[in-house]
Amino acid sequence: FGRLFAYICFCFLFYIMKCHLLALLFVILYSASFIEGRVHTDDKDSSSLPILSVHLVPHTHDDVGWLKTVDQYFYGANNTIQHANVQMVLSTLIPSLEADPSRKFTYVEQAFFTRWWNQQTENMQQRVKKLVKSGQLSFANGGWCMHDEAATHFMGMMDQTTLGHSFLSETFGYAPTVGWQIDPFGHSSTQAGLLSSGAGFDALYFGRIDYQDLALRRSQRRVEGVWRAGADSAGDNADVFWGLTGSYGGNYGPPEGFCFDNFCSDEPMMDDPDLEGYNVGEKVAAFAAAAYEQANEARGTHIMMTMGSDFQYENSEVWFRNLDSVIRNTNEYNDKGKIEEDPHGRFGGIKVFYSNPELYTAAKHEDDLTWEVKTDDFFPYSDCEQCFWTGYFTSRASLKRLERYGSSFLQAARQVEAVSSLGSSPPSSTMSSPNHALDSAVGVAQHHDGVSGTAKQHVADDYALRIDKGVKASASYVSDAVGRLAPGAQGLDFELCQGLNVSVCGTSQGADFDTERLVVGAYNSLSHERDAYVSVPLEEEGPYKVYDANGDEVEHDVFEADDKGVAEGSAPYVMRFRATGVKPMGGKFYTVAKAAGGGPSSAGAGAGAPKPRPAETAESRSLRGSEPPLTATRGGLTVTFTPAGAISSVAGLPVAQSWGYYTSFDSSNADLLGSSAVGVEPQPQGDYLSWTPGVPGTCLPGYLDMEGAEDRWLRDSDGQNSGAYIFRPSRKDERLNILEQSESKVTVVEGALVTEVKAEFGEWVKQTTRLYEGEDYVEVEWTVGPIPIDDGVGKELVARFDADVASADTFYTDSNGREFLERKVDYRPTWDLDVYQPIAGNYYPVNAAIYVEDDSASLTVLTDRTQGGASLEAGQVEVMVQRRLVADDSRGVGEPLNETTEGVTPYPPYGEAERRGEGVIIKGTHRIVVGKGGEGAKKARENMEDMFSPLVQLFATAPSAPAGAGAGAPAPPKGFTAMGSSKPLPPQVSMVTLSAVSSEPGTYLVRLAHQYGAGEDPELSLPADVDLSTVLPGGMEMAKFVETTLTGNQKWSDWEAKRLHWKTAAADPKPSGRERDEGTVVGLEPMEIRTFKVKIKGEKWGTEVAV
């Protein structure tokens, strides 16, 4: 209307001036401009405005397990749950790319791609290589999967990324340069630093950030920037560009109206004018409008549209046919002036083309802008007011522990492979390694619906099965290799007992001590010598004697085990002794034999040593006049307990321990919620497109399945249930429901080396608190379950410790086992938080440790798997241990988080997906460490490696000593080590990886990690130097070495020469260890990890290196 009015005014003006000819010419030109919609009513000439470049990035997001198993997804099986067929995505993709050289495609998950690749003919493989070389087919991330960022440990993240990168390097000579974490539910600083800039990435793209953060960033054009993770230690050395996907809508799909997959409902490009339904004009107009709106929320002249979503492109040509039309017609309309002007007046036109994340990143760099710097992380994530995705930090606790166990054992298996394969040809590829089954299984489990605990039950079972098979395959290899490496171990058939945590070991329980002795091997996968305790399940109390390799007796305890009813076949007794001086990356062996004489086993060395004090109850202690509290002391560490067996102080610091639970929000349970629970009635689920950025009470769009089932999504967050993803207490101000204790159930057992205090909390939590001779930590072993839900109420179980520490509102959690981040209650560093969930909204992932501290004391709690944690009050630490729920949280998985002993029946139409058996029972361990003021991080660092990599225990039987032999004969095998130097590594440095490089004889991948952050310790936070020539297995001589990126897929110098450096408002230069490199000596700064390929001279190594 405004343009029409201006047109009439101009006509009238020229009529008055009687400039008929000039007026006629002007009117004609102006009319043409008006008809084409290109009139500008402001002072800017469109020709002076920049052109908006729209990068269309075709992609598919292929979950490596979620609603279906990885196998089912690949083959397109079990489509009654979800239609998805990955092999058809890849099979139809190749001819579609070949049909037009301008087309491009980005793929991510190598667990799928390698499987498809191995099934192809040589001709097809050559065709694919051509597409990769031309840039039509590119790989973002390039890992085995798209790993989670909350529930993963940095070792698992590194390993799965390295596995995928190794395949791409070996097959295509390809090194990805962009991170692509579009679906994980929050993003860690370790991902930005170590797994992005450290892995050779220029940029990191993702879809999900908190809805409040997102709305603010969209309104302020801050949807992209520079992430400086670990700034205290790394400074701007770790800078990486970051950006949001999915047109900044909170996900990773195409703009509304432009999903062209077979299973999308959007109208296609109907571009034949001779047919009915021709819609090019309206589709182009809608596309241009979407592009201009997206561009108005970003900076620069380039935007990226992610054209694809979950398991799309199964019929690739449908997508490409429509995208071809979008590109062709939009550009043609633009050239002819037939596109509406940018309503925001920023751009004078639009250009659309096929692209990929690498090209988009380069284009953003060419914009030459100065970017805002982010130094914290993107946790926790919420997509609406009541919808904090903090439950999955704990979901499926058993799978989380199994993944951590598999990842830890993988490190040991690689080390053994590295030293035992010397003199023989290495595997021809990563896929042919004897440890590939475990490598692949652990890699798949890192997926953001794997270790996160957010897959369907049968998929979680499949993850567990894969890890179990992988561990068994690697254990068989390790057993054979150890028999070759350890002098005197030849002929022994070692078993890796995976059930030690529940007192199950076939070899030790089955040993006939009348005719056999038990050989116990303790392998230390850390790069520092250490002492640690060994557990041996036994069927009889004894008596026994334990001998080391020199024939000397070793002190030990035999206690009654606590695992009856927890695991089938659990042993009634457990022996514990301390393995001392276990060499770095080496093994030490002990013999357990039957002692002469009868009676129970002695607790010490020699038949005359005192026996363990009989079990003692609080009642009997009281009857003898003992004054509470119960007190236990070991090696200078004193712990007091309440009469019921809960910890009350550690090392003089008051620490009140309790167990309790939150009841889970279930919108269908009116009795539970009550009228005061939510303030309004729960709203029905509805179309997720009703979400409006920044409007309270509406949810961000999340998963949209291929059939377009949008009704899974909540229209209003007040109806949000607690589920596999979401943690929501039934009332936002709910107090923890404390489990009561009984003094009659506490038991104290005191041995020569170990003191145990056993207690029960309620009917479904049992706890054994242990103090070990020579250790400064308190071990809390807990047995939980089955969590009762007979009342129809889900429960979220928490272990809480209240210490006399004036920590105010501040606490610290680790990021994937690396740097610690400061957390504050009800606070976000980059925006003013509107608080809706004061409990769930203050939970953070605890991968390894959480601590509070003040100027006088610190309390650190270490975990054996990822768990959610918080400090809701000063001095308090709470860790969520287990969850059992009765409602689904409407985030796509479609079932409650209710794990049972016998699993679930098939899904419709083959069954009713019914749970079978009782709720599961799980076991786990926390370490509690008290330190001086400001020592929270230091105490965590002293224990984190031990928690991740406990001693690997191997068991074998051998004939007993012949009659007349000495008391200690025959001795167990001699020990061995993979570390060749007598000079230990600096105490703050660890070799976190030693593995043979496939297809490169005599070459080893070595990762050195500085394990302390800046300011965490006055000495151990200092830089350190390591002589690479001294860390190789004994007998090796280094010929040369080269530093590589984290995954070993390119030289670091090559990466540095081509990496993109981003302008920021505040530079923060920090030194790198490389500045101190000299000869074979390399430097490491705090938190720095450096990766090297080391080539040795010849192929010799002395396989009998006794230690």
Image: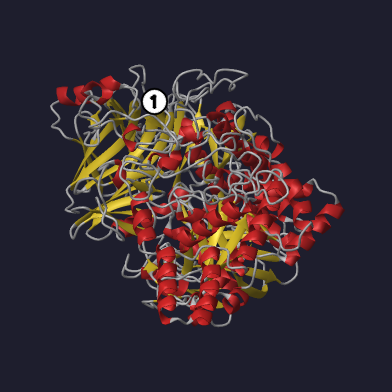
Q: Which image quarter is the N terminus in?
A: bottom left
- The image position of residue 645, as x and y in percent, is 24, 31
Residue in the foreground of this view, choosing between 670 and 31:
31
Q: Residue at x 32, y 65 (%)?
A: 1016
Give above or below for 82 relative to 212: above
Q: Please indicate whether residue 636 sits to the left or right of residue 355 in the image.
A: left
Q: Residue at x 63, y 73 (%)?
A: 1051
**Which residue lies under the disc numbered 1?**
785
Residue in the foreground of this view, choosing between 531 and 89:
89
- The image position of residue 442, as x and y in percent, is 58, 45
Q: Taking the image as drawn, is residue 1082 in sight?
A: no
Q: Please indicate whether residue 50 sits to the left or right of residue 910 in the image.
A: left
| Local secondary structure at mark 1 | loop
Q: What amino acid does circle 1 point to?
A: Gly
- The image position of residue 955, as x and y in percent, is 59, 38
Classify 10 Å Cα crowding around label 1: few (below 14), some (14-19), many (20 and above): many
Q: Please indicate whether residue 123 sits to the left or right of residue 199 in the image.
A: right
Give above or below for 903 relative to 448: above
Give above or below for 17 relative to 813: below
